[in-house]
Image (cartoon, grey):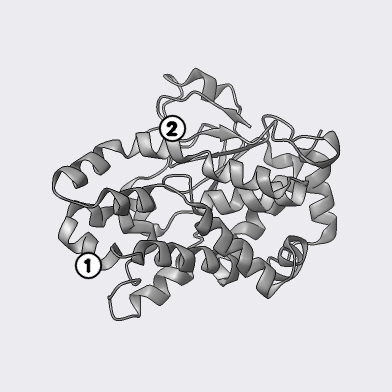
Amino acid sequence: MTVTTAKTVANLRDLGGTPLAGGRSVRPGLVLRSGQLDRLDLEVDRAVAALGIGTVIDFRTGVERGEHPDRVPAGARLLIADALADKMAADAGGDGGPGKIPAAQLKDILSDPVVAEEHLGGGKVQALFTSLYRSLVSSASAQAAYRLLLTELADPQSGPLLFHCTAGKDRTGWGATVILSLLGADDETLMSEYLSVNPAVRIAFAPMIEGFTAAGGDPDIALALIGVYPSYLEAGLDEVSTRYGSMEKYVREGLGVSDETVEALRARLTV
């Protein structure tokens, strides 16, 4: 994995170089992950411009895209794949109580420590993310999003592909896990890549965390919301195991991605 120094894109990482089984690794420069691209400036970020990004997949909701629309590199295709559409619809149909806060907008609640404690204190935020990760495996909208990701990555015409959400940690983190698992990364490598975004996202959201704690908010709530924890990813992996038995069957049966597409993806992305 290579961290690309970027001034206008948070949490930009090239999965290239990640070690795989059999002494292989992920081919550099073809599959990248990041936070949202609303501040992308290729005149400032020449290193990002040099990546030659050909395709961008945006996992964010319509609200997120409306508030912070992507700035896409000239010539790149932008593909929308709202991974949380079904989850958001289900939450909106609930009673508005704990666990019904739209997962994509949880950071907004950090503006009010009292409301945050009510809805997210006492382990509620961890339970909410557990539910979120399970929905990333099981919901139709998430399955469509990750099917698009794998299909595009298998196609040489896509060029270097960047996929992202808002912070680049949850929806994007699950996407990276699926890709690396299919390519042959072991469990330790999957968890290491997943957790390695924590420093970047905590820097990106530092003003929000500091403002929340200065107003009397519980820092544990803020960190559980902004960062990622092993239990979050473990919930998604457990959902795969429970529903499908293996990552390969999840991809084949849950995402509807053919074995031929998976083999093309492996051939293209490994070295």
Q: Amino acid at mark 1?
A: Glu
Q: Residue at x 55, y 71 (%)?
A: 139
Mark number displayed over residue 9? 2
Instruction: Name the quadrant of the C terminus.
Output: top right
Q: Residue at x 32, y 67 (%)?
A: 101
Callout 2: SS:
loop
Spot occupied by residue 10 in the image (x, y as percentages of width and height): 43, 34
What residue is disc 1 on? 118
Q: Amino acid at mark 2?
A: Val
**141 lies above or below 221:** below
**How far apart are labels 1 and 2 at the CA level?**
33 Å
Spot occupied by residue 13 in the image (x, y as percentages of width and height): 56, 34
Q: Residue at x 68, y 65 (%)?
A: 255
Residue sitting nearer the eye, 244 or 118: 118
- Sooner in the amino-acid sequence: mark 1 or mark 2: 2
Spot occupied by residue 22 in the image (x, y as percentages of width and height): 86, 39
Mark number displayed over residue 155? none
Q: Residues within 10 Å of mark 2 (few under 14, many from 20)?
A: many
Q: Residues within 10 Å of mark 1 (few under 14, many from 20)?
A: few
Spot occupied by residue 245 in the image (x, y as percentages of width and height): 74, 70
